[in-house]
Image (cartoon, rainbow, N blue to C red):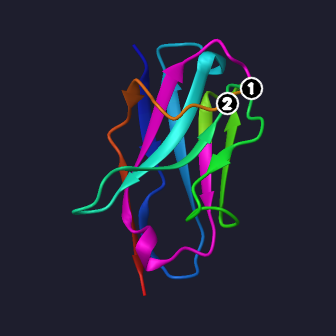
Amino acid sequence: QVHLVESGGGLVQAGDSLRLSCAASGRSFSDLALGWFRQAPGKQRELVAAISRYGISPYYAESAKGRFTFSRDNAKSTAYLQMNSVRPEDTATYYCAARVVYSAHAYQTEYDYFGQGTQVTVAS
């Protein structure tokens, strides 16, 4: 069982930066492919970014490209989503997700474990 805890959300102004963190336990962190999803009220959950076990070539949704950076520190069992130039449309609950995989360098689009989420609200 993998336990994920997100932190770092809050209320920010458009154009600000924010860094979300995802701490994992229950499994060797380097066994996990990771993803960040978000869900706004009345909308479907969206995969924002994904990263392989060793952080090679992360995936970004079009809405995140050029503004968000997904990174991980396997030694600290923590992953980060750096969000720059945030927009009101980035307002959502952000969820960290994990999946145990054997592939070291491929990101995933489906996940088995999710955290409780952290709220990000961007004021215009």
Q: Who is closer to the viewer here, 108 or 83?
A: 108
Confirm whether the magenta stretch covers residue 82. yes
Q: Is residue 67 left or right of residue 21?
A: right
Where disc 1 sits, the SS reads loop
Confirm whether the magenta stretch covers residue 102. yes
Q: Earlier in the sequence, mark 1 or mark 2?
A: 2
Distance from the alpha carbon under mark 1 to that under mark 2: 5 Å
Q: Which residue in the rendered view is the most extreme toward the bottom?
A: 124
Which portion, as a residue range, is magenta?
80-104
Q: Who is closer to the viewer here, 19 or 31?
A: 31
Q: Which residue is mark 1?
A: 105
Estimate the x, y position of residue 65 in percent, counting from the top left.
Answer: 66, 62
Q: Which residue is mark 2?
A: 52
Neighbour class for label 1 at 10 Å: few (<14), some, many (≥20)? Answer: some
Query: On the rendered image, what quadrant is the C terminus found in?
Result: bottom left
Where disc 2 sits, the SS reads loop
Residue drawn 52% across and 33% down? 23
Estimate the x, y position of residue 104 in percent, counting from the top left.
Answer: 72, 19
Q: Is residue 89 above or below residue 48?
A: below
Looking at numbered disc 2 in the image, what kind of residue is underneath it? Ser
Q: Is residue 33 left or right of residue 97?
A: right
Looking at numbered disc 1 in the image, what kind of residue is underneath it? His
